[in-house]
Image: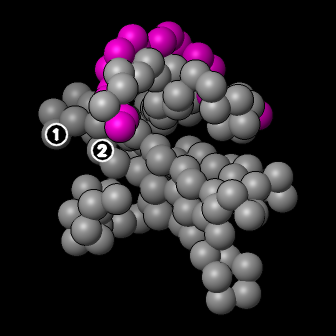
Amino acid sequence: MPPYEDWDAAHLPEYRFVATDGDRVVGWVALTGYSDRCCYRGVADLSVYVDPAAQGRGVGRALLEHLVADADQSDIWTLQAGVFPENAASLALHGRCGFRVVGTRERIGRLDGVWRDVVLLERRSPAPD
């Protein structure tokens, strides 16, 4: 995880949501802009995280549904996410929230020295301008 200052600078401030259980953060979702080019101003990448101890309780779905609803009411017309192919829970979550698989990017990332494929998902706003 990068230092908070770097994370903060990279994520859109109006699209960050946190789930708590009492005073404990159990999940979060946030958007980053896809590109600085004006033609992509309505496209954003999303990240969603749920603490393993809170998985299976609807935390991820609540966060993602809230984010999608906010994006649909704003200038965001496409949300996209990249998920490791073996992360069946995340792929299912995105599918339940209206995302579709658009392809697999092969060997696009490296984690712990291992090249990784990433499944690319997207969700288009139902009424883009």
Identify which amino acid the numbered label 1 is placed on: Asp
Residue 126 pos. (x, y %): 61, 30
Residue at image position (59%, 17%) is 101
Say if 45 sits above or below 59 in the image.
Answer: above
Which secondary structure is most common in the magenta stretch?
strand
Which one is nearer the viewer's eye here, 37 or 81? 81
Residue at image position (73%, 79%) is 21
Give the quadrant of the N terminus: bottom left
**Rendering quarter of residue 52:** bottom right
Residue at image position (64%, 82%) is 24
Q: Secondary structure at mark 2?
A: strand
Q: Is disc 2 surrounded by few (<14), some (14 to 19) or many (20+) residues within 10 Å?
A: some
> Which residue matches tag 2?
33
Identify which amino acid the numbered label 2 is placed on: Gly
Residue 63 pos. (x, y %): 65, 57
User: What segment carries the magenta color?
Assistant: 96-112
Labels 2 & 1 near each other (Cβ < 8 A): yes
Say if 100 sits above or below 28 in the image.
Answer: above
Q: Secondary structure at mark 1?
A: loop
Single out the residue that lies furthest toward the bottom: 23
> Which residue matches tag 1?
36
- Judged left or right of residue 43, residue 102 is right
Reply yes or no: does residue 48 show up in magenta.
no
